[in-house]
Image (tube, coloured by chain):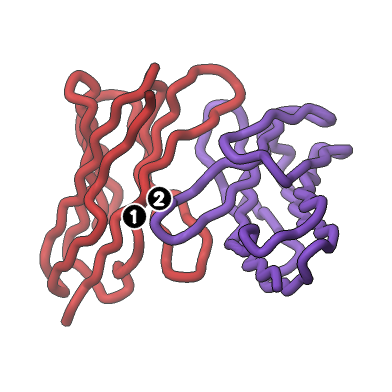
Chain colours: A purple, B red
Amino acid sequence: DVKVTQSSRYLVKRTGEKVFLECVQDMDHENMFWYRQDPGLGLRLIYFSYDVKMKEKGDIPEGYSVSREKKERFSLILESASTNQTSMYLCASSPPGDGYTFGSGTRLTVV
Amino acid sequence: GQNIDQPTEMTATEGAIVQINCTYQTSGFNGLFWYQQHAGEAPTFLSYNVLDGLEEKGRFSSFLSRSKGYSYLLLKELQMKDSASYLCAVSPNAGNNRKLIWGLGTSLAVNP
């Protein structure tokens, strides 16, 4: 089975901190995605990548950056955390022409 | 624009059948996905339709009509564990990137 692992299930950070969310997949998938999910707003794409060192902005990239130095790892960075970034963050990966496998999610609270 | 519509909430009884509808307007079409998401957990893949017709997988079936921009997910012999949110997603593009357009999800409550 494809496994997508997110480093933390729950995280509490202070306003202004730099936050790193890590995601690792073990099936050599080209595509990786970062979403946030909020009640009533559904899944919103932050950034995605379909190759090492390649990244593209999604629908809500402001306040975030990403890094993909190795194929299996896709990191989401909150440059200066703010309370409106409190959310569930979901990483996903997929091979070309197929559906997504999601990680278990990181519930981030910024205080 | 690109849009996916599905009902916000549905309620059904254990043992019954429920149909969750999804309509879409997208710039292109390269397949439709259904995902299940239990509260506090990540979405998990249920089905994929790219051609018109019905795909059956155990208690779950998914139907697609591309000419109508319409799909439904049919859940039979409902169980309490089927209480979850059901997400419809469309791939508007062929090719590698597979960026999906997501509906907001239908929250299904199964009552005893």
Residues tagged by mark 2 and mark 1 found on one chain of the structure:
yes
Q: Mark 2 lies on which chain?
A: B
Q: Can residue A104 be seen in this view?
A: no
The correct choice, above or below, for B100 with respect to A7 in the image is: above
Q: Is mark 2 on a helix, strand or loop?
A: strand
Can you give x and y, in whole percent of width and height, for residue A85 in the image? 64, 58
Of residue B23 and residue A70, the one placed in the foreground of this image is B23
Q: Which chain carries label 1?
A: B
Q: Which amino acid does label 2 sit on?
A: Tyr
Of residue A29 and residue A86, the one placed in the foreground of this image is A86
Report whether A24 appears left or right of B52: right
Q: Residue at point 78% right, 41% down?
A: A66
Q: Residue at point 38% right, 24% down?
A: B1
Q: What residue type is labelled 1?
A: Tyr
Dot 2 alpha-carbon crowd within 10 angstroms: few under 14, some 14 to 19, many 20 or more: many
Judged from this view, the residue extending furthest toward the bottom is: B112
The correct choice, above or below, for B111 with respect to A2 in the image is: below
Q: What element carries label 1?
A: strand
Tell me which label, 2 or 1, sits earlier in the chain. Answer: 2
Can you give x and y, in whole percent of width and height, for residue B21 in the image? 20, 44
Judged from this view, the residue extending furthest toward the right is: A69
Q: Mark 2 — residue?
A: B35
Q: Residue at point 77% right, 66% down?
A: A15
Q: Mark 1 — residue?
A: B86
Can you give x and y, in whole percent of width and height, for residue B77 in the image? 17, 65
The correct choice, above or below, for A4 with respect to B52 in the image is: below
The correct choice, above or below, for A68 with respect to A26 in the image is: above
Dot 1 alpha-carbon crowd within 10 angstroms: few under 14, some 14 to 19, many 20 or more: many
Q: In which quarter of the image is residue A28?
A: top right
Q: Quadrant of residue A82?
A: bottom right
Whether residues under marks 2 and 1 lie with C-beta atoms below 8 angstroms apart, the answer is yes
